Amino acid sequence: MIMIRDEIAADAAAREALLDRCLGERRTAKSSERLREGRLPAEGLALTAELDGEIVGTVRLWHVEAAGIAALMLGPLAVKPELQGAGVGKMLMREALWRAACRGHGAVILVGDAPYYARFGFDPALTRELAMPGPVERERFLAIELRDGALDGARGVLTASGAAIPAAFEAQEVAQAA
Ligand SMILES: CC(C)(COP(=O)(O)OP(=O)(O)OC[C@H]1O[C@@H](n2cnc3c(N)ncnc32)[C@H](O)[C@@H]1OP(=O)(O)O)[C@@H](O)C(=O)NCCC(=O)NCCS
């Protein structure tokens, strides 16, 4: 049975291998990576999907802000290719959005395939006033408000606002992922 649980430090190597497999090693060149690098994910919002002890899915959310308005940036989301289409992505998304709402977060932003994320309520209209810190295809730049009006007044380039990874921990993560 698939279990969705909090990510733990020991998941890092398997998570990175899964992301390389699903998204390619060029994934770190993406604009969204500029909002994640050197930062810790939001508290309670780094999730792992596990099946029989194997990591088969991952999603993480990150603190960002624009014009002083706080939001979360979701990504990357990935599911082991052999298990895609079996609902693991949906489980990760639902748990992530539920947890984000329970923790009082007002909005979640992401860059991804609109036909997939529309089913969870993501809409490109909500990012009209926003920009990424790099190139982005507007139709893939999506958001959902978990609280009505949470993105009112948010405009301009998103910036990372999460806690920085302590230097010693960053070195450990790189070593684990190598
Ligand atoms: C995108 C991804 C996370 C979805 O996870 P999943 O476990 O396969 O998705 P689910 O099983 O919950 O949902 C499957 C449904 O989503 C649809 N779907 C999957 N990927 C899609 C996409 N990129 N665009 C549109 N629809 C998509 C499937 O056709 C299926 O539709 P159905 O329910 O009508 O049959 C997974 O396919 C994946 O890891 N892809 C590679 C990495 C990636 O692209 N990540 C997203 C980066 S933004």
Image (tube, helix red, strand yellow):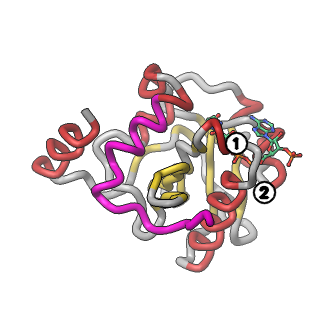
Q: From the viewer's side, name the closer residue of 141 and 45.
A: 45
Q: Residue 54 at x, y = what percent? A: 46, 53
Q: What amino acid is found at the position of numbered circle 2 in the picture?
A: Phe
**Which of 51/90 is in front?**
51
Q: Which mark is residue 115?
A: none
Q: Is tag 1's residue or tag 2's residue first in the polypeptide sequence?
A: 1
| CB at disc 1 and ligand 1 closer than 8 Å | yes
Quarter of the image holding residue 153? Answer: bottom right
Measured as percent of width and height from the top left, residue 69 is found at 54, 59
Name the quadrant of the C terminus: top left
For mark 2, does the 10 Å Cα neighbourhood hold few (<14), some (14 to 19), or many (20 or more) residues? few
Residue of label 2: 120
Could you classify mark 1 by the number of other residues whose Cα lies within 10 Å: few (under 14), some (14-19), or many (20 or more)? few
Q: Nearer the viewer, residue 150 or 29?
A: 29
> Taking the image as four quarters, which one is ligand 1 found in?
top right
**Which residue is at a point 32% across and 49% down the rendered structure image?**
39
Q: In the image, residue 107 lies at what x, y percent?
A: 63, 61
The residue indicated by pointer 1 is 84
SS assignment for the magenta stretch, majority: helix
Q: Which residues are magenta?
A: 1-20
Taking the spot 49% from the left edge, 26% from the top edge, the residue there is 30
Is 130 placed left or right of 115 in the picture?
A: left
Task: For marks 1 and 2, give the CA distance.
Answer: 17 Å
**What is the quadrant of the N terminus in the image?**
bottom right
Question: Is residue 4 magenta-colored?
Answer: yes
Query: For the residue marked with disc 1, what is the amino acid?
Result: Gln
Tell me if residue 133 comes above or below residue 168 in the rendering: above
